[in-house]
């Protein structure tokens, strides 16, 4: 049976998968902090804007939780998002390519809500999938 903390963590990803940003208010504490900070805005509004942005960049976006581990006040999640790159990302216009977005997050919990999230995303993998090329410096 899922704990209160696991349910909140799952809502965090369900909001991204469905675009239902009302789930953000259920998952996150009012003073939620993202580490590193979101570029769009801080707090709940920042995550809601990020959801809207990502769903605009990747049509048909789905999110699968591959692993979820709870220990004390922490919930660790390894997830993968999949969608078609249809909007601008990292300076690259939509390519029509199917893309996987792999991420690992550590969520600190209090009162059944996420109060802080440490996020690590595979930007290098995403960049390669949308056609960015990297060269070695001289």
Image: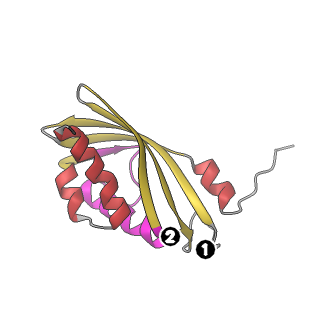
Tell me the quarter of the picture where residue 108 sits.
top left
- Indicate whether 112 appears above or below 70: below
- On the rendered image, what quadrant is the N terminus found in? top left
Q: Residues within 10 Å of mark 1 (few under 14, many from 20)?
A: some
Residue at 12%, 38% in the rendered image: 111
Q: Position of residue 83 (x, y in %)?
A: 52, 65
Residue 96 appears in view: yes
Q: Is residue 114 left or right of residue 90?
A: left
Between residue 73 and residue 66, name the one nearer to us: 66
Q: Is residue 124 left or right of residue 67?
A: right
Q: Position of residue 123 (x, y in %)?
A: 58, 50
Residue with the mark numbered 1: 94
Q: Position of residue 115 (x, y in %)?
A: 23, 41
Q: Secondary structure at mark 2?
A: helix
Residue range (magenta): 33-60
Q: Is residue 4 within the magenta segment?
A: no
Q: Position of residue 138 (x, y in %)?
A: 87, 43
Residue with the mark numbered 2: 57
Tell me the quarter of the picture where residue 77 sits.
top left
Q: Residue furthest right?
A: 138
Are the residues at dot 1 and dot 2 in contact (C-beta closer than 8 Å)?
Answer: yes
Residue at 65%, 72% in the rendered image: 95
Residue at 25%, 56% in the rendered image: 44
């Amino acid at each position: 049976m899922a704990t209160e903390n696991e349910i909140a963590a799952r809502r965090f990803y369900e909001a991204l998968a469905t675009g239902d940003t009302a789930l953000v208010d259920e998952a996150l504490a009012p003073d939620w902090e993202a580490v590193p900070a979101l570029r769009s805005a801080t707090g709940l509004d920042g995550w809601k804007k990020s959801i809207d942005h990502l769903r605009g960049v990747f049509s048909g976006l789905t999110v699968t939780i591959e692993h979820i581990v709870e220990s004390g006040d922490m919930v660790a999640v390894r997830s993968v998002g999949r969608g078609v790159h249809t909007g601008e990302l990292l300076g690259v216009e939509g390519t029509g390519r199917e893309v996987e977005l792999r991420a690992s997050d550590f969520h600190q919990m209090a009162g059944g809500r996420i109060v802080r999230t440490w996020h690590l995303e595979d930007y290098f993998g995403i960049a390669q999938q949308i056609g960015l090329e990297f060269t070695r410096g001289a």
